Image (spheres, rainbow, N blue to C red):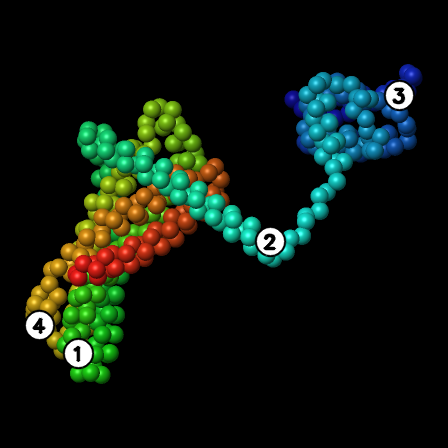
Amino acid sequence: MERPADFSLRTATDRPTATLSGDWTTSGMGEAGSALAQELSTRDDVALDVRPIRRLDTAGAYAIVKAAGDRFDLAKVEGRPETLRLLQLVSEARNREPEARRASGGFHEMTVRVGRGVVDVLREGMDTMVFLGHLLVVVGRSLINPRRIRWPALISQMERAGLDAIPIVATTAFFIGAVVGLLGANMLRQFGAEVFAVELIGIAVLREFNIIITAVLLAGRSASSFAAEIGSMKMNQEIDAMQVMGVDPYEALVLPRFAALLFTIPLLTFVATLAGLFGGLVVVWSALDLGPAFFLQRIVDNVGAAQFWIGLSKAPVMAAVIAGIGCRQGMEVGGDVESLGRRVTASVVHAIFAIIILDAAFALIYMELGL
């Protein structure tokens, strides 16, 4: 039961003493602090006896120090050691002079930011290598002993990251194929070569847009989901509980998501290919009056399946990068919501950036190979 803060002043002794009692806390202090300050302002050399105080927090300690004013002397205070330490801490904080922030020039501030950016990049690179090493160990361990794989979690993640993404991937790829066909038909009409719009659609969809659209959509859909799910578990200390129970979080959380995306992205790429070609076919059929049989025959004769396999060869790499970035950002979440939001945003941005860089690298490699 809370007791209100109170004090009594004894003046019959050699040194007047103010004895404080009750709970000197935020909720129990009331007007006792103001009354004590008014009483001490009319007297000099008053000692404080805080031994009867039941509970004391920083608000109560500040009220006591403020009531004593500049004459507060810890040597004149009698109390328990923990009470004296709190009064000393509050007194030092109250008497501390505010530090003026040193103004810095624009060039100095720029160099500081550049230095911090370089250090952050190196730290991120080191953390990425640690994550990759741990993931490779878990993958190797699971390949040696497949019974360690959590199949229910893997199947569930395959459904959520793969099958549930088919509608959005197919719709987006359809409109991308239609736009490519429409632009190609309008541009080539100036040269009387509208028929080559079929080859343009086939190469663009089979080689580039099928995997790019799929990867970008998975970066915004799955990478953010992985980071949010694992990050929420990290915030709630569920991952710490798993480690205490002897469960490897990489084996229970990261590997199913990594494998699910690795298995489902070829399927999504194939769906995006069909949808993109169908979108281009609709445009060519309606704008150029070239029938489906003519469209498919030119795709088979002049484009070929090699372009499709070139595009599909990028899928496993994209899947590994997207899943790795999403899971790694989730494992780096701290204990606050701000950290969760920052890491989820970083997972999407980093994944899309990595997709663009990888696609450019694949383009250069295949160009050197003559493919």
Q: Nearer the viewer, mark 1 or mark 4?
A: 1
Q: Is residue 102 visible?
A: yes
Residue 122 appears in which quarter of the rendering? top left
- Between discs 4 and 2, the one toward the N terminus: 2
Residue at left offset 39%, top offset 31%: 238
Q: Is residue 171 visible?
A: no
Judged from the image, the secondary structure of the residue bearing numbered disc 4 is helix
Q: Callout 3, which amino acid?
A: Pro
Report the residue marked by disc 3.
Answer: 16
Residue at left offset 21%, top offset 34%: 151
Q: Callout 1, which amino acid?
A: Glu
Residue at left offset 89%, top offset 25%: 45
Q: Position of residue 149 (x, y in %)?
A: 23, 32
Instruction: Rate crowding at label 1 as few (under 14), some (14 to 19) or many (20 or more) other CA atoms within 10 Å.
Output: some
Report the residue marked by disc 4.
Answer: 294
Q: Nearer the viewer, mark 1 or mark 2?
A: 2
The Cα–Cα distance between marks 1 and 2, rounded to whole angstroms, is: 59 Å
Residue 86 appears in which quarter of the rendering? top right
Report the residue marked by disc 1.
Answer: 194
The residue positioned farthest toward the front in the image shown = 368
Q: Quarter holding the C terminus?
A: bottom left
Position of 91 with respect to 191 (left or right) is right
Q: Which mark is residue 108?
A: 2
- Between discs 1 and 3, the one toward the N terminus: 3
- Between discs 3 and 2, the one toward the N terminus: 3
Judged from the image, the secondary structure of the residue bearing numbered disc 2 is helix
Of 283 and 115, which appears nearest the observer?
Answer: 115
Q: Callout 4, which amino acid?
A: Phe
Of 271 and 328, which appears nearest the observer?
Answer: 328
